[in-house]
Image: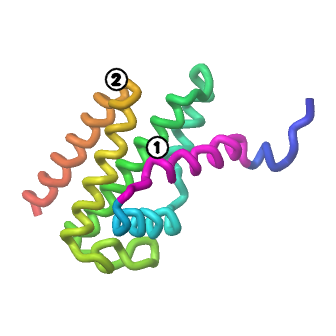
Amino acid sequence: MSISLDEIKHPIRKEMDEFELKFRKAMQSTVPLLDRIMHYIVKRKGKQMRPMFVFLSAGLNGGITESTYRAASLIELLHTATLVHDDVVDDSNLRRGFFSINAIWKNKIAVLVGDYLLSRGLLLSVEHEEFELLKIVSTAVRKMSEGELLQIEKS
């Protein structure tokens, strides 16, 4: 069995390609404005380190399953939601060198987009009855929110 140089450089490339398709599907909406904004977000995505860590962790602990793809999507949806919300809180007009959602569509729409992303991520767990994953991530979001509020209170 031989392994190509590309496989050594990118041991989870196949999983990340499949993740990308599943992630885009998870973001889809029947609301034209929302779908346009989701397209804008996907075109300006980051390095997607969180999904990579999910796949690497799963690979070391029993293997990658459909549940792994949902977990990676959930994490990336929640991360994206927090970035959209952070740009509103920080009144930031740029994200990764591009206009932020709130800079183009204003704060009200940006907050609702962040909420939509959050709900899509949480629904992935609920729809597949993965309540332990939902509990872990919901706890993390609560702690992040509390931490942000503590930081604001202290400053």
Q: Position of residue 91 (x, y in %)?
A: 22, 75
Q: Which residues are magenta?
A: 10-30
* Left or right of residue 130: residue 63: right
Of callouts 1 and 2, the N-terminal one: 1
Give above or below for 67 relative to 106: above
- The residue wearing badge 1 is 73
Give above or below for 82 relative to 11: below
Q: Main secondary structure of the magenta part?
A: helix
To which quarter of the image does residue 121 belong? Answer: top left
Q: Position of residue 129 (x, y in %)?
A: 36, 24
To which quarter of the image does residue 1 belong? Answer: top right
Q: Is residue 17 magenta?
A: yes
Instruction: Please state which amino acid type lies under the numbered disc 2.
Output: Glu
Secondary structure found at label 2: helix
- The residue wearing badge 2 is 132
Q: Is residue 97 magenta?
A: no
Residue beneath the point at 72% across and 47% down: 10
Q: Residue furthest top?
A: 62
